[in-house]
Image (cartoon, grey):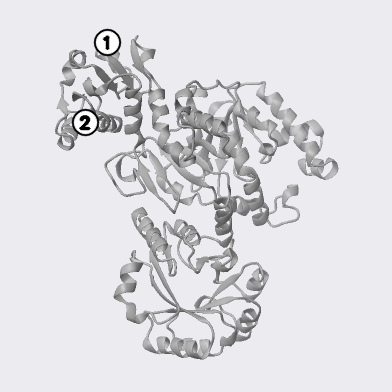
Amino acid sequence: MRASEQIAVSLVDMSYEEALALQGKYGLYELRLDRLDWQIKEYRSFCTSSKVIITHRDTGGNRILTLDQLDWSQIDYFDVDISGDQEYLDYARRQRQSHDFTLICSHHDYDAYVSAEQYISSHAGRFFGDLVKIASMVDRREDMWDLITQMRRFPEHIILGMGRYASKTRCAGLQSGQPIVYSYPQGHGKAAPGQISAEELSIHLQVQDSADRLYGVIGHPISHSKSPMIFGQMMLHEELPHHYTRIALDEMDQLDELHYLPLDAVNVTAPFKYGPDAYLGKGIDEAKNNLDLRITSPASYNSDIDGIRSALLAHVNQRESKILIVGSGGAAEAAIRAVMDRSASCGICARSLDKCLSLKSRYPQLQIRDWARVSEEIQAFDIIIWTVPASVVQDKRISFSQNQWILDANYKEPLTDLIHISRYISALEWLKHQASHMMSLIAPEHDEGLLDRLQLSEKSMGSNSLAIIGLPSSGKSTIGSLLADKTDRKLVDMDQLIEEQEGSSVRSIFAEKGETYFRHLEHRVLQDLCAEDQLIISTGGGVVTQMENHDLLKSMHTIWLCLNPMTCAERVHGDARPMFAENSAIDTMTRLHHERWRGYARSSDMMMICDGLNQQQISDRIYEEYRHIF
């Protein structure tokens, strides 16, 4: 089945003239008779030239009279709700016996989540058609994943979600091969809460078919993460067409809306590593720092444990060692799990006795040591795994012996900034060793010896300026202006600067001298700006189309304003830029997204997920991430 036939576009609350304008654009239309005020002749005309599903949810008295006036020989599907009255169901049976269409027996629950498997088994006698359709409200992430699991188990049924997590379920329906996935035409009314547009489903299909994949690390804050340094080297060595970046989220739910990007897996740091949002809303207590987001194989993993084991193994025999873990947070628990059964003894020393007791209840062999005497307690151990701020060594006047190995969990403020340590395993080395699990997702056949050869130093920025990239109408100029006001830095809008230098508008330059000439100007301007410092730079949306600009952008702090291309398309109404002169904004933005997302990923050091945030919130979040450079 072609994807265009798999996607049904629901027409609701629109005139016949509006529907005619959409005719021929999609492969399958759902005509909601209860929400379309057309004449019978208009229904008949539309059905003559389009593949259609007829749906009527209204239980009013003239329902069957309305249906009976249709030409059933023109109808491809009839969707009947099995909770309807007996007259309605009997009518559907008679029509199915007399005409050659596919009968869909459906059930909808707009108030609660319904297990499709349980509902179908308990109401088997009421499903008398060709296809079974179950739609339920999905307002919890665990219900969403349960529904997706059922989709994979029963691909012959139509199983879909409504509400908060509806979009992810519709994308999953496409990937699991469901007979029909319901959508709506971009810019028009939705037939169900949370429904995703046909255009967005098409984008999802295209990114899923892409050989280039996207990976990243999520957190709040996230600009400090060293993961891109490690995975960037790995991907370069393996010659992979993939991209790894920092991803700034406000909440985990934003991950479920990134169906317009080929995001396969993420590393996770605080605060998403722990608590009720640790893994896809399942509320588990154990931290998970690797999430496989592929619908076909969603999973979580704690590679911190592997990282600690491997980092220690590279230097010391932990089985013959006494190990003390300083701290009681998530990193401390990962350390306990890594060494508990692989050391002579394992102790914990932390400010919170309650947390230590809680850990001991789960790991009875754990020895609790006195925090008030931490400087003395440390001396009795061979290996110290340090998971608290480095400042504690000064506050508690701690020193380490030359024979002790210290594994430091802090790479923002390492212990070695404050104290000399003879035998030191840095947080970066821990991070390097824990990268193995994610790399096995990215490239199962990767060179396993590469980890040992990685360079653990990042290239310093050539400029302290901050550049903003992203699709047209993603908010670059507005966000740049807000940041410039907040930081008292100079704002440079590259398109405006080019217009001033040329004495002509961007539109005129394109029309009179062509895009190649404009891109040359753009590159030259970017080169000049890289030589300056302390700027806020708003780039043009196409700056990443030139490969030579990627390294220039990487020499600065570059933020990718990542926004659903359909949202960008809605913002460009009346836009005078040349790219929107001939084709629709939706078609143009879809094309630009597919052409440019790789360039945005390559050129930026952080993605700012903007969906659901206003421009002030986006500006504040960027300022929070990059406060240290302002």
Residue placed at 40% from the left, 43% from the top? 291
Q: Is residue 375 left or right of residue 287?
A: left
Pointer 1 or 2: first along the chain: 2
Residue 501's place in the image compared with 511, above or below, is above
Q: Of helix, strand and loop, which one carries label 1?
A: loop
Spot occupied by residue 42 in the image (x, y as percentages of width and height): 63, 82
Residue placed at 38% from the left, 23% from the top? 427
Q: Is residue 202 left or right of residue 297?
A: right
Q: Amino acid at mark 1?
A: Asn
Spot occupied by residue 408 in the image (x, y as percentages of width and height): 34, 21
Crowd rating for badge 2 (residues with CA inside 10 Å; few <14, some 14–19, many 20+): few
Residue 428's place in the image compared with 442, above or below, is above
Which image quadrant is residue 152 in? bottom left
Q: Amino acid at mark 2?
A: Asp
Q: Nearer the viewer, residue 28 or 477?
A: 28
- Residue tagged 2: 341
- Residue tagged 1: 403
Q: Nearer the viewer, residue 265 or 273?
A: 265
Query: Alpha-carbon distance for marks 1 and 2?
Result: 22 Å
Residue placed at 56% from the left, 87% from the top? 72
Q: Nearer the viewer, residue 345 or 171?
A: 345
Spot occupied by residue 586 in the image (x, y as percentages of width and height): 64, 56
Location of the N terminus by quadrant is bottom right
